[in-house]
Image (cartoon, rainbow, N blue to C red):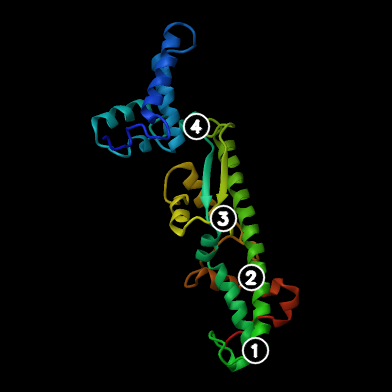
């Protein structure tokens, strides 16, 4: 009994190698019989370039065994087609580029959630003085209800902010793509499309590991990685309308709060709590 491998057909259908061989053979036979334009060499070269483009880089084609003689031959062929620096690679791409982002992770890493907590802490100290603590064990039942109502307003604001961040992040990605296309239309052709998908939908049942595994890598050299990194660094944050900024000696949350961007100040029923008095 044979054990299915990556090269063995499974119950789901024939293996990819057999499908590819059948399709390429059929196409080249048609060319040789003058029933289709082009020639076999051009077809195979264009096919390989398209695969590399869909993967994101030429190096991705040979990533499983980059030091082999086969990899060297494939690399030479790709360089002669898409350029030594993949400068023409995206002209061959037929799949849309997808950037996968988790806005909850992003805003947490940028310190935005700490600002909501800071607002809760400030209001708690204003209302209850020395009896306020993280455990809230010295508050009465009515006082607990009061602070929980305030927290709910901040939770609702956070959801609004997250949706707005997603909108701004997507707009930043698309604006950057258009700028690249304007600067170098041959490298970034009109048919090239980029989509942004946020995988932190509250109704998503995917596991934490599944969500993190599919996120776009911000350290890569491919277009998706570069657009992601650009958007992460330049997307204006809700509440401050400024890009992330880590001033010397401060975390991003410190920079936001020092500039007066306390979340509760954007909630009409909470603005009267103002902000903490400066320490002398």
Residue 67 left/right relative to 23? left
Whole-angstrom CA distance, mark 1 to mark 2, is: 21 Å
Q: Earlier in the sequence, mark 3 or mark 4?
A: 4
Q: Whole-percent x and y of residue 45? A: 40, 22
Tell me if mark 4 has few (under 14), some (14-19) or many (20+) residues whose alpha carbon lies within 10 angstroms of its own: many
Task: Give the residue drawn at x 45%, y 32%.
Answer: 89
Q: Earlier in the sequence, mark 1 or mark 2?
A: 1
Place residue 46 in its image quadrant.
Answer: top left
In this view, the mark in front (3 or 2): 2
The quadrant the C terminus occupies is bottom right
Q: What label sits on residue 234 in the rendered view?
A: 3
Q: Report the residue marked by disc 2.
A: 155
Tell me if mark 1 has few (under 14), some (14-19) or many (20+) residues whose alpha carbon lies within 10 angstroms of its own: few
Q: Report the residue marked by disc 1.
A: 141
Task: Give the residue drawn at x 61%, y 55%.
Answer: 166
- Which SS class for mark 4? loop
Nearer the observer, 217 or 215: 215
């Amino acid at each position: 009994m044979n054990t299915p491998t990556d090269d063995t057909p499974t119950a789901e259908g024939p293996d990819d190698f057999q499908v590819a061989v059948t399709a390429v053979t059929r196409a080249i036979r048609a060319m040789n019989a003058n029933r289709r334009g082009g020639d076999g060499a051009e077809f195979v070269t264009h096919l390989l370039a398209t695969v590399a483009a869909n993967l994101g880089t030429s190096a991705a084609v040979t990533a499983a065994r980059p030091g082999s003689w086969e990899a060297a031959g494939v690399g030479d062929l790709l360089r002669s087609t898409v350029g030594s620096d993949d400068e023409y690679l995206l002209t061959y791409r037929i799949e849309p580029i997808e950037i996968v982002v988790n806005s909850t992770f992003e805003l947490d890493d940028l310190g935005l959630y700490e600002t909501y907590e800071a607002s809760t802490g400030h209001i708690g100290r204003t209302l209850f003085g020395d009896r306020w603590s993280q455990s809230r064990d010295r508050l009465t039942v009515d006082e607990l209800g009061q602070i929980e109502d305030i927290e709910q307003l901040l939770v609702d604001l956070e959801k609004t902010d997250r949706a707005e961040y997603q909108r701004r992040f997507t707009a930043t990605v698309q604006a950057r793509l258009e700028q690249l296309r304007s600067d170098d239309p041959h490298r970034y052709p009109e048919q090239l499309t980029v989509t942004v998908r946020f995988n932190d939908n509250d109704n998503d049942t995917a596991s934490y590991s599944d969500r993190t595994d599919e996120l776009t890598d911000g350290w890569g050299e491919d277009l998706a990685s570069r657009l992601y990194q650009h958007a992460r660094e330049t997307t204006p944050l809700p509440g401050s309308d400024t890009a992330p900024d880590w001033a010397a000696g401060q975390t991003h949350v410190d920079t936001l709060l020092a500039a007066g961007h306390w979340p509760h100040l954007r909630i009409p029923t909470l603005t009267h709590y103002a902000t903490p008095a400066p320490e002398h």
